[in-house]
Amino acid sequence: MGIIDSTYFRIRCPQCGTVNIAETHQRGSNWSPGSWGSISGGGDFSLSVKDDDVSGPDIVSATCKQCGEAAEVELHGFAKPKDW
């Protein structure tokens, strides 16, 4: 079973400038439905996540652990943008 879909999140604190790239992957094959993994990579932020087995988990909100400010979350599909 390989990765059949991915979602990337750019999480940025507008107050202190901290940035993390978080990601989740759907693993499966042509013969079986895929399952989504947990979001990983947002360690500098407290994340509130909504799980959805069809479209994958989504970050509902993020708070910076360093300064407590609400973070901006940008979602991107299968390929991580090169400028991230």
Image: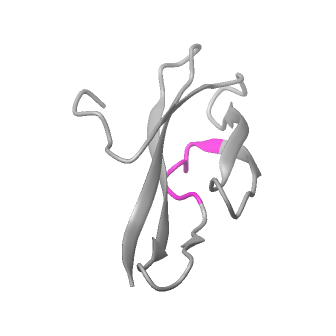
Of residue 5 and residue 59, the one placed in the foreground of this image is 5
Toward the left, the furthest residue is 82
Toward the front, the furthest residue is 31
Q: Which residues are magenta?
A: 39-45
- Helix, strand or loop for the magenta stretch, by majority: loop
How is this picture coloured? one colour
x, y percentage for residue 1?
Answer: 39, 85
Give the image quarter of residue 38.
bottom right
Give the image quarter of residue 2.
bottom left
Of residue 62 and residue 33, the one placed in the foreground of this image is 33
Count of numbered badges drawn on the protein:
0
Q: Residue at x 44, y 55 (%)?
A: 6
Q: Is residue 38 above or below residue 50?
A: below
Q: Is residue 78 above or below residue 1?
A: above
x, y percentage for residue 69?
Answer: 70, 22
Q: Can residue 63 be found in the magenta stretch?
A: no
x, y percentage for residue 7?
Answer: 48, 49
x, y percentage for residue 32?
Answer: 52, 84
Q: Residue at x 62, y 33 (%)?
A: 66
Toward the top, the furthest residue is 15
Identify the image quadrant of the C terminus.
Answer: top left
Left or right: 38 as drawn, with respect to 49: left
